[in-house]
Amino acid sequence: MNIPTMIYIRGYLKVRVRGEQLPSFINALSEAATPVWEIKPTGEQSAEFKLLLSDFKGLRPLLKKTGCRTTILERHGLPFRTSHLWKRKIFAAGMVIFFFTLMLLSSMVWNIEVEGNEKIASEDVLEAAHKEGVYTYQWIFRLKSLDRLSADLTAQIPGTSWVGVERKGTSITIQVVEASVPKKPVLQSPRHLVSTADAVITSIYAEKGVPKVQVNTRVKKGEVLISGILGDEENQRSVVAKGEVKGLVWHEYQIEVPLTKKKNVLTGEYKSKSYLVLGNRAVQLWGYGDVDYEVTKTLSLYDPLTWRTKPLPFGWMSEKVMEVQQTTETITEDEAKRQGLESAFRDILAKYGAETRLVGQKILHDKKENGKVYMKVLFEVEESISKELPIVYNQGE
């Protein structure tokens, strides 16, 4: 027999019927046009089937006529669920209150973020937004349209070319585009360009000012290279000297390189540990037991839980304790000298600029002692040797 429609809403039962006249009962059901389905014999004088809740009372005359008895095995459908909830009134009321509260909370602004501002303080943007009715715990339906809010905030906040407002759920993002203001040139007092070291000039270019030295001239530290005073004694004008001066400079280095070096190499073996982080405390969950590695390196990764892009004070931390094997590397004396010279020149580049050029190097003294190579080296390099020096006039001048 076909299954009736909307059986879940109408409710249905699974029953068992027992009796000697079971075939007569089944025939009587068919004659009465009572819809039943999933009829399954469970014995010689018993069977199970399903029928609508509204048809269950109609079985009584048929049961009395055939002398059969019935037992309810299962109850399904909305009427039974409603009855069950009605018996648990407090739980049902709690569910209603929960969903009502959830609906109210989802109708309020809970988070406001300001993005894109560098010079304008976020507090000023939030204060202007508050005047327009945008603040936390505000009802969403009371907000102005986003286009109108954008126009009003752009007009209120000075120094902005555009302010955009975007809402996602209960969060509002205020995007600030600051107006570009041309930078005012920094006022500089007149000054010379002087030498930073004893050197021999290799090139000089004076963009502004008067050159006081020439190529191949030997200069002392602090000597004026490009003067910021133009004209003669009677007609003088001071400017900010600009230009570039390069020269040959000598640097002496004491170099010490060991012939044996210890290196740490990862073997690939590791042990993992996992922690539950609650505030400043971490509770280990997995990875108990001692670590048998003699030398280890630990890599930690903390993954905090977030709520609307805000990190919460708890999360998950995983650690990987990796085994490290210490090895010893031995190098030759020539290799040690090469490494020492390269390290010294890298130091020169770091101190005097990447444009520094190595012209020559001379090992003044070297020796091998106590498993190390010692060297005294003189480097000849071409580097920029100019720096600014303010022009100071006497009070009587």
Image: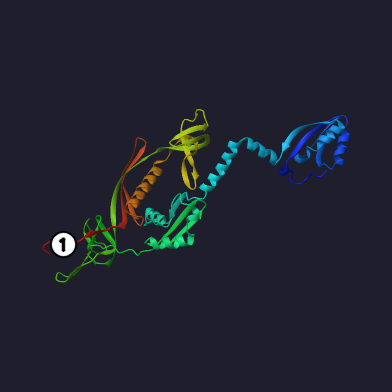
Residue nearest the observer in this picture, 95 or 347: 95
Please indicate, yes or no, whether residue 321 appears anywhere in the rendered image.
no
Residue most toward the left?
396
* Location of residue 181 in the rendering, given as x and y in whole percent from the top left corner: 36, 64
Residue 251 location in percent, x, y? Answer: 29, 50
SS of the residue under disc 1: loop
Q: Nearer the viewer, residue 20 or 262?
A: 20
Q: Which residue is drawn at 41% across and 41% down?
A: 332
Q: Is residue 13 left or right of residue 308?
A: right
As drawn, 196 above or below 320? below
The residue drawn where x is 75% and y is 33% is 73
Name the quarter where the C terminus is drawn: bottom left
Q: Is residue 111 or residue 10 the one in the foreground?
A: 10
Query: Relative to residue 24, is residue 200 drawn left or right?
Result: left
Q: Where is residue 309 in the image (x, y as percent from the top left)?
A: 48, 48
Q: Name the residue carrying label 1.
A: 393
| Residue 391 in view, yes or no | yes
Image quarter where the N terminus lies is top right
